[in-house]
Amino acid sequence: MTNKKYTRSIRLTEDMHQRLTALCEHLGVTVNAYMTGEIGKAVSRDEMAFKTQEQQSSMYNLLNDLIVSSAQQDNENV
């Protein structure tokens, strides 16, 4: 993984900007550090949910294939 950094822009309402700035001052972190950390948490959470859903779908497809194969073998033995 590379250490290359990318810049993104967001638009905040005045209220959100003030609340975010006040929170970061209280926490003793920069707005950038706070937002980067929170985005990282959200991406990790959502990525995990997506991967879990993908794996479940793959497992269901495999199970379906096994059931169909077993049924076909049973039909051949009849």
Image: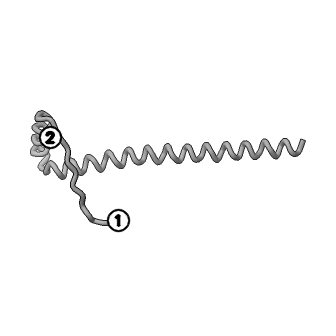
Rendered residue at 69%/46% (across/down): 65
Q: Label 1 amino acid? A: Met
Q: Are marks 2 and 1 in contact (CB under 8 Å)?
A: no
Badge 1 density bin: few <14, some 14–19, many ≥20, Cα 10 Å: few
The part of the image, by quadrant, that contains residue 74 is top right
Rendered residue at 14%/50% (across/down): 29
Badge 2 density bin: few <14, some 14–19, many ≥20, Cα 10 Å: some
Rendered residue at 38%/44% (across/down): 46
Residue 35 screen position, x and y as percent: 21, 47
Rendered residue at 78%/41% (across/down): 71
Residue 72 screen position, x and y as percent: 80, 44
20 lies left or right of 5? left
**Residue on which disc 2 sits:** 20
57 lies left or right of 4? right
Q: Secondary structure at mark 2?
A: helix
Quarter of the figure with the C terminus: top right
Vertical side of 15 occupied by 65: above or below: below
19 or 8, which lies in front? 8
Q: Label 2 amino acid? A: Leu
Quarter of the figure with the N terminus: bottom left
Q: Secondary structure at mark 1?
A: loop
Sooner in the amino-acid sequence: mark 2 or mark 1 = 1
65 or 52, which lies in front? 65
36 or 4, which lies in front? 4
**Residue on which disc 1 sits:** 1
Residue 66's disc is none
Residue 59 screen position, x and y as percent: 59, 46
